[in-house]
Image: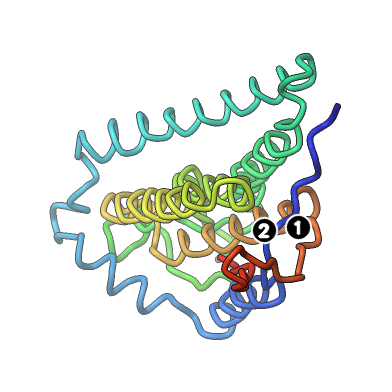
Amino acid sequence: MSAPELKARLFNFRFWFALPLSVMALMLLVDPGPLDVAISNLFYEPGVGFVGRQSFFLEDILHDRAKQAVIVIGVLAIGGFLFSLLLTRLRQYRRPLGYLVLAMALCTSLVTPLKALTNVPCPWSLQQYGGDQQHTSLLSERPSDAKPGRCWPGGHASAGFSLLALFFMLRDRRPRAARVALIVALGLGGIFSVGRTMQGAHFMSHNLWTLLFDWCISLLCYRLLLYRQPVTAPQTTKNHGVVHHEPI
């Protein structure tokens, strides 16, 4: 006998799609370059370079090991999904695990083709930071003699922000755990973003774009794969009170 269909709680999809898309449009209309440079300047010392460029913690721990930890989460999700195809008692977890695998895969795989398409150089390659490349805005035409750049959007940040998918996977099943997952995803992605900015690998807006992309991807997959029309009728308690479905 199959488990009853889980009904989702109310969610304002229009607002939570419109907000990130509006931020994207704003960054296309108003160049965040001056603010990016001002932030990166905080971590740059003339004649020395970016303060985090040679940092063991930022490179080996926060970049390599932390990314590997996120990969482990993805591998476990894939393994759980495959087991749900084989074991009947895990069938109820098939859809949420499938969602998690798909959303995380799309969030992380989107970065590489966008890097190749936009051809944006890293801060450490720019002339004002000791490099030989010219700083141009995202939509500006690159100089004909410019070297290929692979720094937009932020790749490492996507490892942290891809965990936004955990929030949506848990939202209708474990609301408290979902909130924790949301905090972890935003916190981890934010830490990765700051770390790579300190190293000169990215401007901060590069990582903000990654957050916006990953949120939209996770939200779209949630809408298509997991979200079910919520029960809107109030439930009467023993004390003749009313319990409303409060959205997260």
Mark 1–mark 2 distance (CA, rounded to whole Å)? 6 Å
Left or right relative to 120: residue 88: right
In the rendered view, tell whether residue 3 sits above or below residue 248.
above
In the rendered view, tell whether residue 77 sits above or below residue 199.
above
Nearer the observer, 150 or 198: 198
The secondary structure type at the circle numbered 2 is helix
Q: Position of residue 42 (x, y in %)?
A: 20, 66
Q: Position of residue 101 (x, y in %)?
A: 67, 35
Left or right relative to 39: residue 216: right
At a point 79% along the width and 34% down the height, the residue shown is 3
In the rendered view, tell whether residue 116 sits above or below residue 237.
above
At a point 20% along the width and 60% down the height, the residue shown is 43
State the residue lying farthest toward the right: 1
At a point 73% along the width and 20% down the height, the residue shown is 89
Q: Which residue is mark 1?
A: 223
Q: Position of residue 94 (x, y in %)?
A: 75, 31
Determine whether label 1 and label 2 are within 8 Å by CB.
Answer: yes
For disc 2, the neighbor class at 10 Å (few under 14, some 14 to 19, many from 20) is: many
The amino acid type of the residue labelled 1 equals: Arg
The amino acid type of the residue labelled 2 equals: Leu
Can the viewer see residue 139 in this picture? no
At a point 65% along the width and 61% down the height, the residue shown is 216
Q: Quadrant of the C terminus?
A: bottom right
Q: Coloured how?
A: rainbow
Q: Which mark identifies residue 219?
A: 2
Nearer the observer, 45 or 40: 40
The secondary structure type at the circle numbered 1 is helix
Left or right relative to 14: residue 44: left
